[in-house]
Amino acid sequence: MNILIDFIPFQHNGGVGGTASFAKAVYDDLLTQTSEDTVVFGACDMRLAPGRQYDHELYAKEHNINLLDISKQPIRELISNKHIDVFFIAVGQFYAGYDLDGITCKTIMFIHDIFDVERCDNKIDLCLHDMRKENIVSWAKRIVNVISGRYRRIARKRYNAVMPLYSSGNTVSYTVSEYSANALKYYFPDLDKEIHVCYAPSRNVCGTTHISNESLKGVIEEGKKYFFMVAANRIYKNPENMLKAFRQIWREGHDVRLITLKYGKSIDSRHIDIDFLSDSDMTLAYKHALALIFPSFFEGFGYPPIEALAQGTPTIASNVTSIPEILGGAGIYFSPFYPSDIYRAIKDVLSGNHIDKVRMAQRLQEIQSRQKTDLHNLINDILNK
């Protein structure tokens, strides 16, 4: 059996984030279950650099995976030449720039979320502007792109490129939450087929007490209390309203730090911004935090709340899209549109209110059980079992 797996998430935009983690978690499990007569190929783009989080070239070498460069010839030709039986696409949107015509082998394809379509519908860009990070010219361009319909045309072009394969008869269509499945059905009503939901599997992280990042190490070793936010460089993750809430917390004199990942700058002496954390450092950042802050406007699944729960750390989170589905009754929720509500949730943590450790443990067990079952079914689907 010949299998082609998707390494583009390891390379796309530096390969840092949930989609790269998702792909690696699937492949780590898949490669433990392949038989001796199974040959695994990896689809990559040699024009792109290896990812910062996971180096696809090193991963391929370690697991005896043959790399195929999909930038040099149509994927259908590579599939035909290598007699591929199953093509696994971890993130369908990343393939909008490649030739997907003529792929006739069994294809398993994920679309994690369609926030680029939803943002054009609800026009959320019109109420987002972080004055500390986005200059007036960049903000104005974004607004013009929304009003003129340019963002909508870009999204339409992207999905016009990938939806024919996603909806084809030889493709098993997947997404990562019931929310995303319903969003796909709502925005693509012609998608007349079952969309399978597979909760994104947990990453395999080696346990360690060593902290590599010096900034994180200093905060933890000094015993400072802190909240933690990931992917703060993305405006749709809502760092602006979160920081507004923290400014009020600091004005009230609370001795608490805020650690953000990739915001790009620190706005206060009590704000520590970190550019990159390894998987092991991320685990320790979750473990020692008072709480994870997850104020996103959009999430297809959302790893961070589950990873925080695994470390016994509570999450204060948005009450929109897939987040309540995944976090269940284990979260402290707020409206992402109101800084005052984020402020209220932060105060709840500082006062110890609404943190139910028993409920957190129960939800972690429930979600991990679902992740394990869904991953088992997905691997069986890839291996034609």
Image: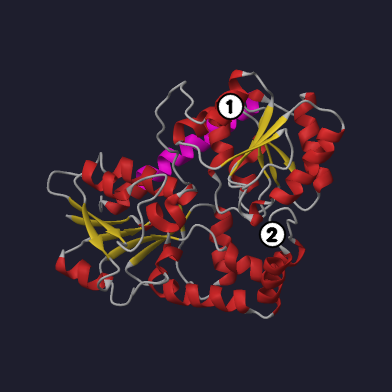
Marks 2 and 1, Cα distance to the nearest angstrom? 39 Å
Q: Amino acid at mark 1?
A: Ala
Q: How many marks?
A: 2
Q: Quadrant of residue 165?
A: bottom left
Residue at 53% across / 52% down in the picture? Answer: 177
- Can residue 311 be seen at all in this image of the molecule? no
Which residue bears the numbered disc 2?
Answer: 134
- Position of residue 117 measured from the top left corner of the image (x, y, whole percent): 59, 69
Q: Secondary structure at mark 1?
A: helix
Vertical order, 220 against 193 (above or below):
above
**Where, by quadrant of the figure, is residue 345 drawn?**
top right
Most foreground residue, 147 or 109: 147
What is the quadrant of the N terminus in the image? bottom left
* Secondary structure type for disc 2: loop
Q: Residue furthest left?
A: 37
Q: Is residue 359 magenta?
A: yes
Q: For the point 32% across and 77% down, which residue is it?
A: 101
Whether residue 147 appears in this view of the structure is: yes
> On residue 361, which mark appears?
1
Question: Magenta segment range?
Answer: 358-377
Q: In this orientation, which residue lies closer to the viewer: 11 or 110? A: 11
Q: Amino acid at mark 2?
A: Glu
Q: Picture coordinates of residue 45 (x, y %)?
A: 32, 62
The reply to whether callout 2 and callout 1 are in contact (CB within 8 Å) is: no
Identified at 35% across, 71% down, the residue is 169
Front residue (pair 350, 57)? 57
